[in-house]
C-alpha cells in the first residue's frame, strides 16, 4: 500500500506538535526537571472523585443526551451567570463536549466553509491552526506584542481583516503567555467587530485562573453574544484534565449545527465525568480558591526570581504560565531551550512553538510545587550567568 | 497569618524575603508577623523532619497509650507535664476514647524503650496501665513525605 498517496492530504500536511519534540529529548535524559507541563499538578478535589465513584457503584453507565446531562447544563449555565454574568439557556445554548478541545474543533467544523480565513491570535496553544486546516479553513496568524503584554489591539486586528475573514480566535487568559484581556481592551476590539459579520471563538479554559483581577468574557459586550462561541471546561479550573470534559456556549443556531457533528462523531461526553462535574460546579468553590491562591504564590515567587536573575518578564495575571523574554541571552528560543536542557537539565518550551511572535520567549509553567520551582529557578540562574550577553 | 503559618509549616527555613514575595507582602510586614506569632506563643519553635531510618538505623520509636487517674484539682495536666519532662519523650497528647495520654518516644533500642516504660512510666503514681506500639516505618510526618516522592505522572501530550 502506498500510504502517502492514499491517505488524506490534509492530514499529512499537518505538522507534528512542536512542543513534543523537546520532551522526547528530555525523556531520554537523567535528572531533568521540567517546567513544561500544561496541566494542574493538583489532584482532582476529593468530593468530585467521590461523586464519580458513587456513580460507578450505583448507576448504569449508559449513553446520555447528546448535548450532555440537562442537570449539568443547568449547573454550567448558573456557573457562567454567577462568574461572568453571561446568560445561556441550558436547553439549546450549551453543549457538553469532550474537553474544551472538542468544542474548539466543533466550532471550526460548524462555521468554516472552504477558503474562509480564521484569524488566530498568537502566541497561542498549538491546536487551532491544524484544526482550522482540517476544516478546510485558512489559518491566519494574528501576532500580538510583548510590549502590549500580549493583548490583542484593535489596530492589529483591523490590519488582518479581509472579506474572507470568518472567525477570530481569542484565548485569554492565555496559554502560553499568561496574558489577560481587560475590559478596556475588549471595548476597542468589539467596537471594530460589531459592524462586521465575523464570528469570535473565545477559548476561556483558564478563565478562573486570574490573579488580582477577574476574568472578563468578550461574549458580555454589546453585539458580541450573537457572534461569539465561548469554550470552557473542567480541566484547568477543577484539575480534571484526564476526565475530558468541556463545553461550548453559543446562540441556538450554532449549537444546533455543532450538536449534529457531535452526535455523529462522539455521541455524548463521558457520563461518569458528567456526573462528577455536577458536583464540581456545585460544591468545589473553596477547593478552587485554594488552588488559585497557590498558583498565585508560585507566580509571585517566579516573577521575583526572574527579576533577580535579570530575565525580563511581564507580570502575567492569568493561566499558570510566565513567558519571559530570553533576548538578553542572544539566543533564539529553540536554541535557548535546547542548551538549557543539555547544560542544566531544565525542560521548558520554546515560545516559537506557539507562533512566530514568541521566538524571543520561553514558556514557563508553574503548575509545580514551590520546592520544584525553586530548584528549577536556581538552575536557570546558573545557566543565565553563563550566557548573559 | 494562616497562610504564613502554612508556608512556615511546609518549610520553616524560607527567608522572610522569600515569604514576602510568595505572600505578596513586604518583608518588614512578614518579619513583624512572625515576631508576633512567636511572642504570642503561636509558634513554639522550629524543628526539622528527619528520616530516622537514614539518620540512625538503631533508633527505635514507640507510641504508648497511657491510662491514668486524673488528679484532684489539676486533672490530667500535672501528669502530662511530668511525663513531658522526660527528654526522650517527643510528644504528649491528651486523647479522647479508650485511653488518656498518647506519648511518642524515641530510644536507642527496644530494651531502652522497654526499661523506660517499665521503670519510668509505669511507676508514676496515677498511671493505671500502658500499652506500647513500636513504629515499624514512617511514611509521612507533619505533612512531609518520609519517602521519595512519586514520579510526576504528567506527560506532555501536545
Image: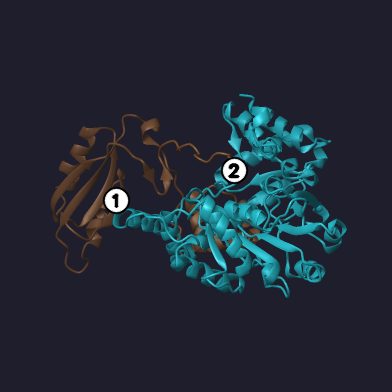
Chain colours: A cyan, B brown
Residue A355, horizontal then vertical, whole percent: 76, 45
Task: Return the chain for callout 1.
Answer: B
Provide the residue designation for mark 2. A37
Task: Return the chain for callout 2.
Answer: A
Q: Residues within 10 Å of mark 1 (few under 14, many from 20)?
A: few
Q: Quadrant of residue A111?
A: bottom right
Q: Residue furthest left?
A: B128
Residue at image position (51%, 71%) is A91
Residue B86, horizontal then vertical, whole percent: 28, 47
Residues A350 and A19: in front is A19
Query: Is residue B73 toward the left or the right of residue B108 in the image?
Result: left
Residue at image position (52%, 48%) is A41
Distance, label 2 to label 1, CA atoms, is 50 Å
Provide the residue designation for mark 1. B85
Q: Quadrant of the C terminus of chain A?
A: top right
Query: Mark 2 or mark 1: which is in front?
Result: 2
Amino acid at each position: 500500500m502506498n500510504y502517502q498517496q492514499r491517505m488524506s492530504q490534509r492530514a499529512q500536511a499537518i505538522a507534528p506538535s512542536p512542543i513534543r519534540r523537546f520532551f522526547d529529548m528530555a525523556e531520554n535524559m537523567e535528572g531533568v526537571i521540567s517546567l513544561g507541563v500544561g496541566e494542574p499538578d493538583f489532584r482532582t478535589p476529593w468530593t468530585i472523585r467521590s461523586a464519580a465513584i458513587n456513580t460507578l457503584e450505583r448507576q448504569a453507565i449508559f449513553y446520555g443526551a447528546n448535548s450532555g446531562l440537562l442537570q449539568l447544563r443547568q449547573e454550567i449555565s448558573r456557573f457562567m451567570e454567577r462568574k461572568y454574568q453571561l446568560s445561556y439557556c441550558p436547553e439549546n445554548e450549551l453543549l457538553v463536549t469532550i474537553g474544551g478541545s472538542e468544542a474548539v474543533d466543533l466550532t471550526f467544523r460548524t462555521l468554516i466553509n472552504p477558503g474562509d480565513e480564521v484569524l488566530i491570535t498568537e502566541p497561542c496553544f498549538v491546536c487551532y491552526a491544524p484544526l482550522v486546516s482540517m476544516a478546510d479553513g485558512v489559518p491566519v496568524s494574528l501576532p500580538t506584542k510583548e510590549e502590549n503584554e500580549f493583548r490583542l489591539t484593535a489596530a492589529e486586528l483591523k490590519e488582518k481583516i479581509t472579506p474572507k475573514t470568518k472567525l477570530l480566535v481569542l484565548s485569554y487568559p492565555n496559554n502560553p503567555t499568561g496574558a489577560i484581556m481587560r475590559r478596556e481592551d475588549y471595548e476597542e476590539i468589539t467596537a471594530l467587530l460589531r459592524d462586521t459579520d465575523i464570528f469570535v471563538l473565545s477559548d476561556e479554559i483558564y478563565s478562573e485562573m486570574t490573579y488580582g483581577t477577574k476574568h472578563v468574557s468578550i461574549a458580555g459586550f454589546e453585539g458580541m453574544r450573537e457572534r461569539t462561541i465561548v469554550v470552557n471546561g473542567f480541566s484547568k479550573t477543577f484539575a480534571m484534565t484526564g476526565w475530558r470534559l468541556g463545553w461550548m456556549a453559543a446562540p441556538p443556531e450554532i449549537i444546533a449545527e455543532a450538536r449534529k457533528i457531535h452526535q455523529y462523531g462522539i455521541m455524548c461526553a463521558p457520563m461518569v465525568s458528567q456526573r462528577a462535574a455536577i458536583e464540581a460546579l456545585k460544591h468545589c468553590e473553596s477547593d478552587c480558591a485554594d488552588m488559585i491562591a497557590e498558583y498565585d504564590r508560585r507566580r509571585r515567587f517566579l516573577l521575583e526570581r526572574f527579576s533577580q536573575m535579570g530575565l525580563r518578564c511581564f507580570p502575567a495575571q492569568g493561566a499558570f504560565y510566565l513567558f519571559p523574554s530570553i533576548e538578553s541571552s542572544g539566543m533564539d528560543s529553540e536554541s535557548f531551550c535546547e542548551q538549557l536542557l543539555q547544560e542544566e537539565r531544565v525542560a521548558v518550551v520554546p515560545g516559537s512553538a506557539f507562533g512566530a511572535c514568541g521566538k524571543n520567549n520561553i514558556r514557563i509553567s508553574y503548575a509545580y510545587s514551590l520546592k520544584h520551582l525553586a530548584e528549577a529557578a536556581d538552575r536557570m540562574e546558573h545557566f543565565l550567568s553563563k550566557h548573559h550577553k | 497569618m494562616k497562610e504564613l503559618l502554612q508556608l512556615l509549616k511546609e518549610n520553616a527555613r524560607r527567608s522572610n524575603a522569600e515569604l514576602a514575595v510568595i505572600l505578596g507582602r513586604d518583608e518588614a510586614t512578614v518579619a513583624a508577623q512572625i515576631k508576633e506569632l512567636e511572642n504570642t506563643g503561636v509558634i513554639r519553635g522550629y524543628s526539622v523532619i528527619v528520616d530516622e531510618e537514614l539518620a540512625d538505623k538503631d533508633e527505635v520509636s514507640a507510641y504508648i497509650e497511657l491510662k491514668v487517674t486524673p488528679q484532684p484539682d489539676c486533672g490530667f495536666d500535672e501528669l502530662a507535664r511530668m511525663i513531658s519532662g522526660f527528654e526522650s519523650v517527643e510528644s504528649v497528647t491528651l486523647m479522647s476514647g479508650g485511653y488518656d495520654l498518647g506519648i511518642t518516644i524515641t530510644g536507642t533500642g527496644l530494651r531502652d524503650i522497654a526499661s523506660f516504660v517499665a521503670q519510668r512510666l509505669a511507676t508514676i503514681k496515677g498511671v493505671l496501665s500502658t500499652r506500647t506500639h513500636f513504629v515499624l516505618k514512617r511514611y509521612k510526618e507533619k505533612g512531609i513525605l518520609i519517602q521519595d516522592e512519586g514520579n510526576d505522572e504528567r506527560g506532555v501530550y501536545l
